[in-house]
Image (cartoon, helix red, strand yellow):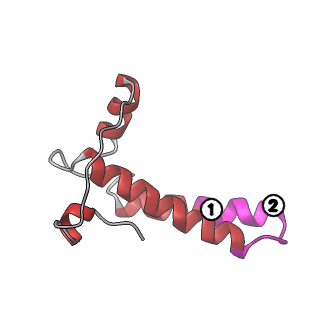
Amino acid sequence: MYSNMSESNPKKSTVTTIRIHTDVRAKLDAIKMHRRETVEDVIVRLLNIYDELASVSKQYLGTAPEDVLRESLKLYKERRRLAGFR
C-alpha cells in the first residue's frame, strides 16, 4: 500500500513536480473525499485502489471473464460507497 510519504517519514521524503492538464486536475479535485484533501492524497488513494484491483485480477486469472468483471465491479462499488458516493 502506498502512503503519503511526507507523513510517514518526513526526513527521507523528496518532492517532485508533475505537470497535468487542467481537465485532469479538475477530475482529481472532483474525487476528493473532502475539500481539504490534497491532490497527492487523491493519487495515493487511487494507487491503492489500483493495487487492490490488480491483486483481484491476478487472483481470478483462469476464471471466466464475467466472474472477473463481476468481482471487479463489486469491489469498485464498495470503494465508492466507502468514499461517500452513491
The number of numbered badges drawn on the structure is: 2
Picture coordinates of residue 74, whole percent (x, y):
58, 64
Pick the residue in front: 24 or 7.
Answer: 7
Magenta segment range? 59-73
Mark 2 or mark 1, which is nearer the start of the sequence? Answer: 2
| Circle 2 crowding by C-alpha within 10 Å: few under 14, some 14–19, many from 20 | few
| Circle 1 crowding by C-alpha within 10 Å: few under 14, some 14–19, many from 20 | some
The amino acid on which the numbered mark 1 sits, given as a three-letter code, is Ser
**Main SS of the magenta segment?**
helix
Q: How many angstroms separate mark 1 from mark 2 (CA)?
A: 11 Å
Extreme residue toward the bottom, this view = 59
Q: Is residue 80 left or right of residue 13?
A: right
Picture coordinates of residue 24, whole percent (x, y):
40, 31
Residue 62 found in image quarter: bottom right
Instruction: Give the residue pinned by disc 1.
Output: 72
Secondary structure of the residue carrying tag 2 is helix
The quadrant in which the N terminus is found is bottom left
Residue in the picture at 58% in, 64% down: 53
Secondary structure of the residue carrying tag 1 is helix
Q: Is residue 6 left or right of residue 54?
A: left
Q: Is residue 63 magenta?
A: yes
